[in-house]
Amino acid sequence: MTDLETREPAPRQDNRDPALFGQTPSQTVGPFFHYGLPWKGGADLVGQSEMGARPDLFAEEHWLLNLSAPTGTPQGAVIEIAGRVLDAEGAPVVDAMIEIWQANAAGRYHALDDDRDDVPIDPHFIGFGRAAVDAEGVYRFRTILPGRVPGPGNSLQAPHVAVSVFGRGLIKRLATRLYFEGAAGNDEDPVLACVPAERRGTLIAQQRGEGLWWLDLRLAGADETVFFDL
C-alpha cells in the first residue's frame, strides 16, 4: 500500500467555512443614488422643470437624459412639498433619496385596480415622483394637493402623500406619510389615529408661504419621524 493510499483525506474547506473567512462583515448601502436613480424632472409631477436629480454631481457630458414628454395639465391645486432629511444629531443627510406616491386631486390613485367609476382618473397625473436631496439635505417636489381616498370601514382618509426614504445604511426603505396641517379629515384619519398623539406632528407638514408645505424627516433621535412597518 502506498503512502498516497494511507494518507488521511484533507478536510473539505469552501467559502462557507468559518475557519477560512470568519463572519462576513456588514456593509451599508450606497451612497450611489445621485448617479443612477433620480432623473431630470423626476420630482416635478406637474410640469417640465429639471427638479429631481442633482446636476452638480454630474459631468456636463453625462447630463443628457431628456424630460418626460408632457401629456397635458393635471387638475388640482399645484403645491410644493419640501423638507430636510436629518440624522440622530440633527445634521443633514446629504446622500438620501426620497420617493412619493399619492392620489390625484379627486382622491384616486393612478392604478388599474381602482374601479370607482364616480372618481375620475386624471390622465395627466401619475402620482409618483423621485428626488435626490440637495447639498443641504433638502428634498423638494412639485405636485398636486391630493384628495381624500377611502379608508377602512367606508371611512375617508385625510389628504396625504406616501413617502419613502432611501439612504446610506438603510437596507430597507423607510416608509412614512406626509399630512397637511389643518386639512379636512386629520382628526379622523385612521392611520393618524394609530400614532400616539405626541408624535403625530412628525407627520404633519406646515405651510410656509403660498403653496409650500414643509416637513423634516428625522431618521433617529429626538422627534424621530414615525415610520411604518411594511
Image (cartoon, rainbow, N blue to C red):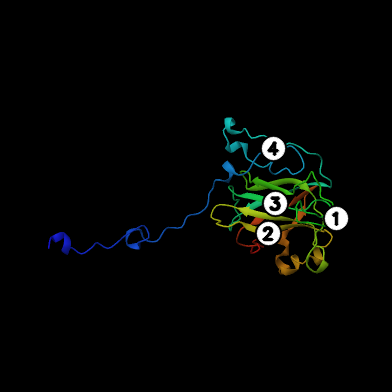
The spot of residue 11 in percent (x, y) is 27, 63
Quadrant for residue 224, please give it: bottom right
Numbered mark located on residue 176 in the image: 2
Query: Left or right: 206 with respect to 29?
Result: right
The spot of residue 140 in percent (x, y) is 70, 46
Numbered mark located on residue 80 in the image: none
N-terminal of the two: label 4 or label 3? 4
N-terminal of the two: label 3 or label 2? 3
N-terminal of the two: label 4 or label 1? 4
For badge 3, the amino acid type reads: Ile
Q: CA distance from mark 4 to mark 1?
A: 34 Å
154 relative to 138, above or below: below
For badge 2, the amino acid type reads: Thr
Which quarter of the rendered picture does the C terminus lie within? bottom right
Which quarter of the rendered picture does the N terminus lie within? bottom left
The spot of residue 57 in percent (x, y) is 58, 38
Name the residue beneath numbered marker 4: 50
42 relative to 170, above or below: above
Residue 78 seen in render: yes
Quadrant for residue 206, please give it: bottom right
For badge 1, the amino acid type reads: Asp
Numbered mark located on residue 100 in the image: 3
140 relative to 195, above or below: above
For the residue pair 36 and 219, the one nearer the viewer reads as: 36
